[in-house]
Image (cartoon, rainbow, N blue to C red):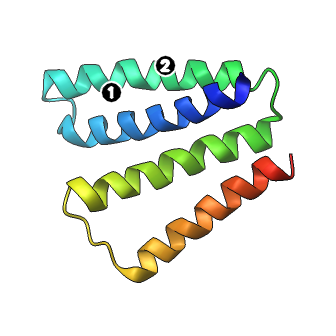
């Protein structure tokens, strides 16, 4: 269960990062509220998962999922460049996250 919560929390990290961008410095109410709610939920899920998963592994996986997810949203939905080198770097992060899980 802790691993599922950790993955969901990583996905919520993507949500709060995108909402933070969309909040325009907290001047837009709806994205600001989405940011606050998803941030708290993401942190709460990470805290829950760290009761069973070592902090180094859990935090690295949480950040990796959030970073890759945020970069993918940026490339797919927000017009950020999707160059081959960027995609290869994201695949390296994914490989690191998978490796941390496999060698846990």
Which quadrant would residue 21 be assigned to in this image? top left
Residue 4, image x and y in percent? 64, 28
Which quadrant would residue 35 be assigned to in this image? top left
For image coordinates 78% across by 35% down, the residue present is 55
The residues tagged by marks 1 and 2 sit, at their Cα atoms, a distance apart of 10 Å
40 sits to left or right of 46: left
Residue 43, image x and y in percent? 56, 24
44 sits to left or right of 103: left
Q: Is residue 32 above or below residue 20?
A: above
Specify the label residue 35 is tagged with. Answer: 1
Where does label 2 land, which residue? 41
Q: Quadrant of the N terminus?
A: top right
Circles 1, 2 touching at the beta carbon (< 8 Å): no
Residue 40, image x and y in percent? 47, 19
Callout 1 secondary element = helix
Specify the label residue 78 is tagged with. Answer: none
37 sits to left or right of 53: left
Which is nearer the N-term, disc 1 or disc 2? 1
For image coordinates 67% across by 54% down, the residue present is 97
């Amino acid at each position: 269960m802790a691993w599922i919560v950790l993955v969901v929390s990583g996905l919520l990290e993507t949500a709060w990062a995108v909402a933070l961008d969309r909040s325009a410095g907290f001047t837009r109410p709806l994205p600001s509220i989405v940011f606050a709610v998803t941030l708290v939920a993401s942190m709460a899920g990470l805290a829950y998962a760290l009761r069973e998963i070592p902090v180094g592994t859990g935090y690295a996986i949480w950040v990796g999922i959030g970073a890759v997810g945020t970069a993918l949203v940026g490339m797919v939905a927000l017009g950020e460049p999707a160059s081959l080198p960027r995609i290869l770097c994201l695949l390296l992060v994914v490989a690191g996250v998978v490796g941390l899980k496999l060698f846990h």
